[in-house]
Image (cartoon, helix red, strand yellow):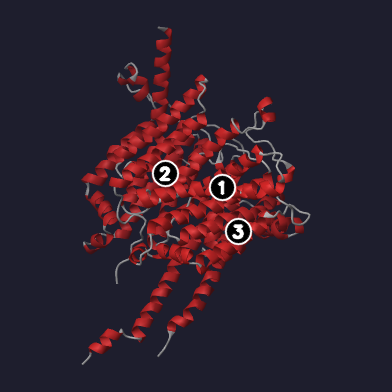
Amino acid sequence: MNSDLMVLTVLVGILTSGIRLATPYLYASIGETLGQRSGVLNLGLDGQMLLGAFAAFYVAFTTGNLWLGLLAAIIIGGLMGLAMAFVSVTLQAEQGISGIGFYLFGLGLSDLLFQETLGTVETVKGFPPIHIPILSDLPILGPVLFSHNIMVYMAYLLVPIAWYILNKTVFGLKIRSVGENPAAADSLGVSVGRVRYVTVTFAGMLSGLAGASLSIALLNVFQQNLTNGIGFIAVALVYFGGWRPLGVLIGSLLFSMVNSLQLWVQVLGLPIPSDIAVMMPYVLTILVLVVAGQRVRGPTALGKPFERGE
Amino acid sequence: MKNPPLTTPRIDKLYNILMPLLATLLALIVGSVMLILLGVNPIEAYKALLEGAFGSKNAIADTIVKATPLLLVGVGICIAFRGGVINIGGEGQLVVGALSATFLGLSFPDAPGWLIIPLALLAGFLGGAVWGGIPGVLKAYFNVNEILSTIMMNQIAVQGMNFLLRGPMIDPVQLEAASKIPQTARLARLFDLPRLVPTRLHLGAALAILAAILVYILLWKTTTGYRIRAVGLNQYASRYAGINVKRYIVLSLLLSGAFAGLAGAVQVYGVNHRMFTDGSATGFTGSAGFNGIVAALFGQLHPIGTIPASFFFGGLLVGANAMQRAMQVPSALITALNGLLVVFVVSSEIFRRRLTRKRMMQITEESPPVIEAEATP
């Protein structure tokens, strides 16, 4: 009886933190989905996230206002997105490599600013959990689904919003057409460049939020290389999810649940090497890509700069 | 009849030198602005950087030691990018190469150095080849994007390293101690790569230069290299010409990984003499897997061009630490500037393409197509 209760508590704990931990993956990979559907591969997500995380933390730490922190993360992420758009759309640079450049830039600059302004690891009081009335009192489901902070709820809300934008709006149609056949879209009067600028800049803003969700909502600290590669995983999740928001959600949950599980394995002191547990989602992603690679096809123009024909 | 194509290589060569220089200048200017914002005199900071990197015999030796893994990773990157595949997996390949080489050395502590050193380098080369070859097979035969699979392979390698260094391969001394620092035992001193002059400079640097020359010969003087480059330029045309495209995709990634793996082995036997981890890849690699890409791009994806480029970036890394000590400027500044350099270099490609196109149009205007000329009655 007692051990049953224990198992239940642990299970609820794993699920709850799994739901929470999906947050940064969701912001980043939903943004990247929109960008890739328009034909731009942005590998620099992790750098955008790091700068967003720093901006949010620094502003929240100095002003005490979390919302100003979020705003700062959106602005910085948006600027990084705009820069990526300029390089990949206007200058037509090879996207995979310029993304690595932006990653190194974000990694270095966020570390530099951290050392120059804060110097040591500080903490902020992040967004408090919002217990949704009635629903949060439900057994099991209450703590797992309805007792999170605002950043977590917003991340999940983003999934249907992105789906709606992509599939039910005129702009979504433009995004998809620009990613599939830019020449045809161009001949119909769609400005390929403008659409890509919008998606990549918006994706940058979301990456900034992804970083902020780490620094002022989940971990509530900033340190060097805080993201530790989450941005790269987010890019992979887009492929994993077959460029669909729902697929991306499933992928994000898979990663976060396994991470949560391995945290609990450590907490409970189970004799499973946590490094091997952490490795599993990556192995699984490769396997999924092998299976998906046979049938799911990405946007045709992905990674190819567009130039009006002569 | 005029012959414009004959004059073109000179312009291209000029471009190859001019563009990296302009990109560097631009990055230095941005760096100056950042330094001024930090309240540091940029001229003094750059002076400290230059002196730290090239100011003395020891400084130059350190720069070459730092440049060695960049060059080895970089020549691998030249193969991959020339073959039309993007290898982001240098970090993981380097780690696996280092692990393989370390494992070999720890397994035969009493064997003679002349036997173990070459075998360990080979083990590193093969370990990296496996880690690069897997994404190659996945791309060629399963249509898996190599950018993603190499990123995943990086993460798998890091977790594997953490597991091995915390458990099976941990230094027995650390296992006894309370600290349990995740590192292997020190390799036998007989296995240290020979030092070249009385500095930290070791044989690995010479090996890296040799590797660059060999890869140059491979890519430009052999049929295999010709095919690798042909596949990189145009897969469809290559297939039409009877080249087994899939095989060359695998080969490009495999060789690219192999040289990164060799870099890992050289790093262990030449510098650290053991493996250690701080939980991330960077702790061991110092981001050489990424910086090698930067160096190769800077060397215009030419193995010989990558030699000075690696020396330059090795100097930046060594100088950044000197600058940090002298001026209290975090060396992270140099990481940020490295990133900007990459962005500038790839962005500048558009000017070369425009130039090429203009030239092509000139050629067609000056010598009208033969068919048209014959068609006139």
From the top left corner, tell me how far across and down residue B282 is, in percent: 57, 44
Chain on which label 3 sits = B
Q: Mark 3 points at which residue?
A: B32
Amino acid carrying mark 1 in the image: Leu
Q: Determine which residue is flagged by label 2.
A: A207
**Pointer 2 chain:** A
- Callout 3, which amino acid? Ser
Q: Please state, as top left, top right, bottom left or bottom right, where the N terminus of chain B lies in the image.
A: bottom left
Q: Position of residue B375 (x, y in %)?
A: 23, 88
User: Is residue B307 visible to us here?
Assistant: yes
Q: Say which quarter of the image contains residue B233.
A: bottom left
Residue drawn at the location 22% of the way across and 50% of the way down: A170
Residue furthest out toward the bottom? B377
Mark 2: secondary structure? helix
Chain for numbered disc 1: B
Sequence order check, earlier mark of 1 and 3? 3
The label on residue B94 is 1
Q: Which of B141 and B76 is in front in this view?
A: B141
Camera-side mark, 2 or 3: 2
Residue A58 visible somewhere in the drawing: no
Spatial CA distance of label 1 from label 3 is 33 Å
Where residue A79 appears, as percent x and y from the top left, is 43, 51
Callout in the foreground (1, 3): 1
Q: Where is residue B120 in the image (x, y as percent from the top left)?
A: 63, 46
Q: Could you tell me if the residues under marks 1 and 2 are in contact, i.e. CB atoms within 8 Å?
A: no
Q: How many marks?
A: 3
Which of the pair A32/B156 is nearer the observer? Answer: B156
Compare residues B215 and B64 and report the one nearer the observer: B215
* Gap between marks 1 and 2 measured at Cα: 29 Å
Up-down: is B315 above or below A167?
below
